Image (spheres, rainbow, N blue to C red):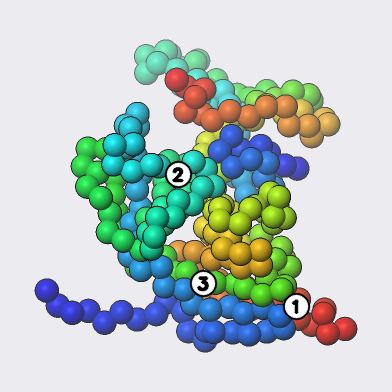
């Protein structure tokens, strides 16, 4: 599996660290209530197909949001988290 | 100020195994330059694009990660208010891997595409060497400068020498 780093180009999976679903970026407001926080912390989808997750490119120190297909292992797109949050 | 005695981070070099040599490399003072978000450094220096190495005489500005460059071979300019500037001279260990099989040795340890078309002469790349995070600079078709954290100097030389032995053993079959 290879992931295109927006900074470094196409790189081997060994250079990356997986974090989890990219919904982790959507942090609820402090007063959003127990249900919202419970969902944010603990509940994740487990799709067979297209998913978005967070990967860290260790060598260049970039957090990436990677859109990929868990069935075909195809990597569809990547973008830096700094842009995704801007 | 006390005149401190510099001690090398690595021992046992130079090594020559098969058609590859591994030698210690002294880049001189190394300064990390990390621009503050949104700041333009162009009035003071040209910041390298990913993979770029800017050479001006003895001075080199090496791209060393996202929004990070290493300045070697000269003092850092005044970047007050523009960038975080830190002395990294004793934080990193540098070696040079060179020789006809240098690429073959590196390919055993590093997942980077080492073909000259993907990693051209005179450019830098951040990658991993086994489990070490390394900065690579290609200085010739078959020569690489490799920088790793100084605390990992022993591991760096051990991994490289093991791969050199393996490549030499295969060539001798």
Query: Image height check: is A5 above or below B58?
Result: above
Residue ranking furthest to the left: B1
**Disc number lying in front (1 or 2):** 2
Q: Quadrant of residue B105?
A: bottom right
| Percent x, y of residue B113 | 70, 52
Label 3 residue SS = strand
Q: Dots 1 and 3: beta carbons under 8 Å?
A: no
Query: Image height check: is A50 above or below B31?
Result: above
| Percent x, y of residue B86 | 29, 54
**Disc number lying in front (1 or 3):** 3
Q: What label does residue B48 carry, if any?
A: 2
Residue in view at x 54 percent, y 84 percent: B14
Query: Image height check: is A9 above or below B156?
Result: above
| Percent x, y of residue A13 | 69, 46
In-image side of A17 versus B166 (left or right): left
Q: What label does residue B37 carry, if any?
A: none
| Percent x, y of residue B53 | 49, 52
Whether callout 3 and callout 2 share a subunit is answered yes
Residue ranking furthest to the right: B173
Q: Chain of mark 2?
A: B
Res B22 visible: yes
Query: Image height check: is B141 above or below B100?
Result: above
Label 1 residue SS = helix
Label 2 residue SS = loop
Q: Quadrant of residue B36?
A: top left
How many labels were placed on the picture? 3
Tell which circle, 1 or 2, labels the residue nearer the N-terminal end: 2
Residue in view at x 66 percent, y 75 percent: B99
């Amino acid at each position: 599996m290879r992931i295109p780093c927006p900074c470094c180009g196409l790189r081997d999976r060994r250079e990356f660290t997986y974090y989890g679903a990219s919904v982790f970026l959507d942090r609820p407001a402090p007063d959003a209530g127990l249900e919202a926080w419970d969902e944010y912390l603990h509940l994740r989808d487990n799709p067979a197909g297209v998913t978005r997750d967070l990967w860290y490119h260790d060598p260049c120190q970039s957090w990436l949001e990677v859109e990929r297909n868990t069935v075909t292992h195809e990597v569809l797109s990547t973008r830096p988290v700094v842009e995704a949050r801007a | 100020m006390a005149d401190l005695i510099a001690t090398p981070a690595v021992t046992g070099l130079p090594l020559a195994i098969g058609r590859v040599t591994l030698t210690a490399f002294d880049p001189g003072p190394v300064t990390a330059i990390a621009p503050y978000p949104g700041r333009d450094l162009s009035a003071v220096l040209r910041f390298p694009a990913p993979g770029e190495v800017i050479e001006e005489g003895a001075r080199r500005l090496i791209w060393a990660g996202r929004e990070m460059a290493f300045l070697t071979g000269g003092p850092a300019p005044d970047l007050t208010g523009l960038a975080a500037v830190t002395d990294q001279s004793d934080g990193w260990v540098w070696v040079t891997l060179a020789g006809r099989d240098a690429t073959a040795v590196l390919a055993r340890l590093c997942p980077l595409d080492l073909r000259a078309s993907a990693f051209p002469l005179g450019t830098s790349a951040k990658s991993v060497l086994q489990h070490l995070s390394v900065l690579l600079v290609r200085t010739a078709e078959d020569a690489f400068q490799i920088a790793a954290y100084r605390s990992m100097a022993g591991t760096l030389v051990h991994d490289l020498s093991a791969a050199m032995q393996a490549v030499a053993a295969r060539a001798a079959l």
